[in-house]
Each structure stands twice: as C-alpha cells, then as structure tokens.
Amino acid sequence: GRSFRPEGTKITFPNGVVVGGEEVVVMAGPCSVESKDQILLSAQQVAAAGAKFLRGGAFKPRSSPYSFQGMGLEGLKLLREVADQTNLLVITEVMEISQIELMLPYIDCFQVGARNMQNFNLLRELGYIRKPVLMKRGIAATIEEVLLSAEYILSGGNYDLMLCERGIRTYETYTRNTMDISAIPVLKKLTHLPVFGDPSHGVGIRDLVPPMALASVAAGADGLLMEMHPNPDKAMSDGAQSLFPAQLEKLMAQLRQLAPVV
Ligand code: PEP
Ligand code: MN
C-alpha cells in the first residue's frame, strides 16, 4: 500500500538512473534480440534518442510454438555486450525459475511478461533475489490480481519492483489490446511502486504508440517500455508495433514537453 512509503519507492540502477524520481525513464529496443548487428544498431539508436535502458527478449513467450523463440543465453550475452558499449542498462524477460541464475550476471532488471504475471512460483523466487523486477499486468488481470501478484515478490523482501500496464483483452479488436490508461493513476494511488506504460503491446499498431506514450506520461507514469527496431518490416517479432528509430527520437522530444525524460 501507498502508506508503507508515502513518498514512493525509488530504484537506483548501477549507472545512477533512478526510477520513481523526477525523471520519466524510457526503456526501448526491439521485441527480440535477433543478431549481433541488429541489437548493436538498436542500442546505438536507443542511446542516440537519449534513453537509458535497452530492452530485448532473449527468451520469448510466443503464442505459437513454431514461431521464433529467442536466442537464449547467446541473446543475453549480446544484450550485455552492446549495452556496455553504449552505456545502457539491460531489461529482458524471465520466463521460468531456472533462467534466473543464468540471467543474473547479464542483466540490470528482470521483466515478468503478461503471460507469467500469475506464475506464482516464478514470482516467489523473484522475491528472494536482489535485483529490480518490472512486472507486467496479465492479459486479463484485474487491478486486485496485479496487486496480489506484486505481493508475491514484495513479501520475499525484494522491494525494487515496478508495475507495467501493457493493455488488456477486451471485446475491441481494432487494437491488439486495450491500453487501460486509468490503471496508471489507480496503481499510483494504491501502491508505492513505480508504474510504467507499455504502449507498444497496449495497442499493437506503430503509429498509435506515440499518442499512448504521451497519454501514459500525462497520467503519471514513471516510465515507458517501448519497442523500436532498426528495420521494423524485417523484425522477427512484433514489427507492426515497433517504432522506427526516427519515431522514437521525435517521441522523446514530445515527451520532454511533459516531463524530464531519460
Ligand atoms: C514483450 O515485452 O516483448 C512481451 C512479450 O510483452 P507482454 O508480456 O506484455 O506480452
Ligand atoms: Mn513484443
């Protein structure tokens, strides 16, 4: 609850970036790590846009078992290598308990995906480590379910937790999901945790990402998680919702009209 820490939780990362402070923190990059060239170029473009976190999945939760499943350990190594070259932090998704140990040396933040928000055994283990976690809202999770899942991590003693609205499934099919902007102020009111918006998965359509990113920040988001690809038309996953690098640069400038952004 908010009363536990009325001033809100602040998370300080190794390069001095603070989540939950004055600045809105942008985490950007491709849906998946695909190759050395692709992730290096992505990192350079994310850094050039002024963001401080590189995202990219090495373990991918794909709807079809026949779709690209991610590069695994090789992807983690590439993330760390290119992030160090470009002075970025790394956030990437953990899908199962056995990956936690493997990932720890390579990453700065664990991402729990929407599909695993109710993988309670995984959440419990993430409570025992001492590395920040960003937990996404489940595809059809109520706010109360989000809060109880967060409690699995917090009750293990890991308070470096961020929540993320990434759209929920409704009857509307025009957008991939329905981005519940109201979840942002609701979670800010009910918890002491930093709250992120992920407009990429929220809408699934590239050109709708900037307005929903701006809306998230206007609604009080502490940060944004967004997909950007050097060549979205060639992306191995989520190309249709991935920003072109120039779109990210432009969006960063627009966001700075609302709040200080890193
Ligand atoms: C992702 O961030 O690429 C992802 C798989 O997101 P979600 O878990 O929100 O679907
Ligand atoms: Mn994705």
Image (spheres, rainbow, N blue to C red):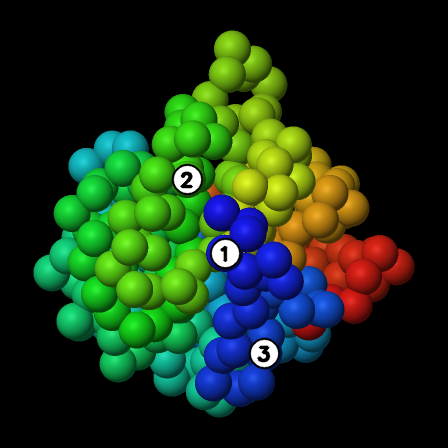
| Label 3 or label 2, whichever comes before in sequence order | 3
At x 79%, y 68%, the residue is 260
Name the mark nearer the viewer: 3 or 1.
1
**Residue 45 x, y percent position in the rendering:** 62, 72
Q: Residue at x 47, y 85 (%)?
A: 14
Which residue type does callout 3 highlight? Val
Q: Residue at x 17, y 62 (%)?
A: 99
* Numbered tag placed on residue 4 in the rendering: 1
Residue on which disc 2 sits: 147
Residue type at mark 1: give it. Answer: Phe
Inspect this view and state whether residue 148 appears. Answer: yes
Q: Position of residue 100 (x, y in %)?
A: 20, 65
Graded by Cα atoms within 10 Å as few (under 14), some (14 to 19) or many (20 or more), the crowding at tag 3 reads some
Tag 3, which secondary structure?
Answer: loop
Q: Nearer the viewer, residue 38 or 257?
A: 257
Classify 135 as above or below 84.
above
How many discs appear? 3
Q: Secondary structure at mark 2?
A: helix
Q: Is mark 3 within 8 Å of ligand 1?
A: no
Kind of residue at badge 2:
Leu
Most distant residue in the front direction: 3
Q: Nearer the viewer, mark 3 or mark 2?
A: 2
> How far, Cα to Cα, is label 3 from label 2?
25 Å
Secondary structure found at label 1: helix
